[in-house]
Amino acid sequence: MPFKSLGDESATMTRFFPLHPPPPRAMDRYAVIGKPIQHSKSPLIHQAFAQATGQVLTYEKIEGTLGQFAATVDRFRAEGGLGLNVTVPFKTDACAYATDLAESARAAGAANALKFEGDLCLAQNFDGVGLVRDIVHNLGHAVQGKRVLLLGAGGATRGAILPLLAEAPARLFVANRTVDKAMDLVGFFHDQGASTQVLEGGGYPDLHSDAFDIVINATSASLTADLPPLPVTALDANGLAYDMVYGKGLTPFLQLAQRSNVRHLADGVGMLVEQAAEAFAWWRGVRPDTQPVIRQLTVPLV
Ligand code: NDP
């Protein structure tokens, strides 16, 4: 029996028995995972970026469970998830989960953004670069040649050290309530080649009466309306006082700076939006304009 050409048959089939149209392609899926997560502004930020850049995607919140990070991320990937932002308390879990760490995540020992490519899980930490972009580009304070004081020695400080050092400050002092933590952190970066002339650490009393051009509150004290034991002499009136916490108006730290007549005060809303923009660009290959979103989220410092 002569073979029928496949082309003829499929043409006939198509004409008389329409094949099902291909299912609509599932939308590219992203999320932020943390605990608690209800307060997160990340969905609002990423949806605004997507709309502004014409990217079609979904972005949701995932409430994680302690000890279940890997299982939750595995499930998200199995369901087609392409990338995650990671927030407290899972940033170190994210680092352990990843197969490939960028320098930012390796140095911080923590990741705040993951990208899934087949079996690979790439990890980045954009917090520090977001901070520096906000200070240098948005607020117009060059770090180069400046005296910079970082308060706190937790994850946020750890992520900020390399991006700040890359801007070549004259001095970067890490002050922490638990002095050993500051010394360990600074020692870690000295071991990686950071200059002992530039990067120093200690307790608050070790600040003596030294003044700094840029003072960054990277403690979590503002979350509980507390104030780190910062001597007012550390604040230069012509400088910048920057609180990484956002949306809380004038925190006790910013109030102290205001009472000390510091000219420039800022909270961490720009850092939040800038780190999100870095993640968005990494995932989607297009960098969104951050200014409209920063304006939308800014809570006046009063
Ligand atoms: P960690 O819990 O890792 O570290 C907290 C640090 O704060 C520790 O060094 C701790 O000191 C210090 N601390 C807490 N309370 C006090 C106090 N009353 N007085 C003095 N020091 C205190 O937190 P993270 O590093 O992850 O986050 C720090 C802050 O940065 C948070 O407020 C967070 O919201 C903010 N953040 C903002 C981001 C943004 O995008 N704007 C991004 C990431 C973080 P000790 O070691 O002695 O306990």
Image: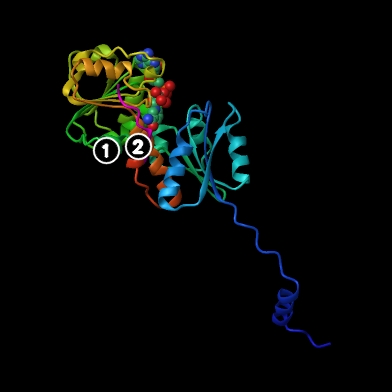
Residue 205 falls in image quadrant: top left
Judge left or right: residue 294 versus residue 211. Answer: right
Query: Please, what is the three-letter code of the amino acid marked with disc 2?
Result: Ile
Q: Which residue is mark 1?
A: 138
The reply to whether residue 281 is visible in this rendering is: yes
Which color mode does the image show? rainbow
Query: What residue sits right under mark 2 in the picture?
Result: 294
State the residue lying farthest toward the bottom. 2
Indicate whether residue 61 is drawn in magenta: no
Q: Residue at x 61, y 30 (%)?
A: 68
Q: Which residues are magenta?
A: 293-302
Q: Which quadrant of the figure contains the C terminus? A: top left
- The location of residue 227, given as percent across then percent down, is 33, 13
Quadrant in which the N terminus appears: bottom right
The residue carrying pointer 1 sits among few (fewer than 14), some (14 to 19) or many (20 or more) residues within 10 Å by Cα, namely some
* Near-viewer residue (262 or 279): 262
Q: Position of residue 25 (x, y in %)?
A: 60, 56
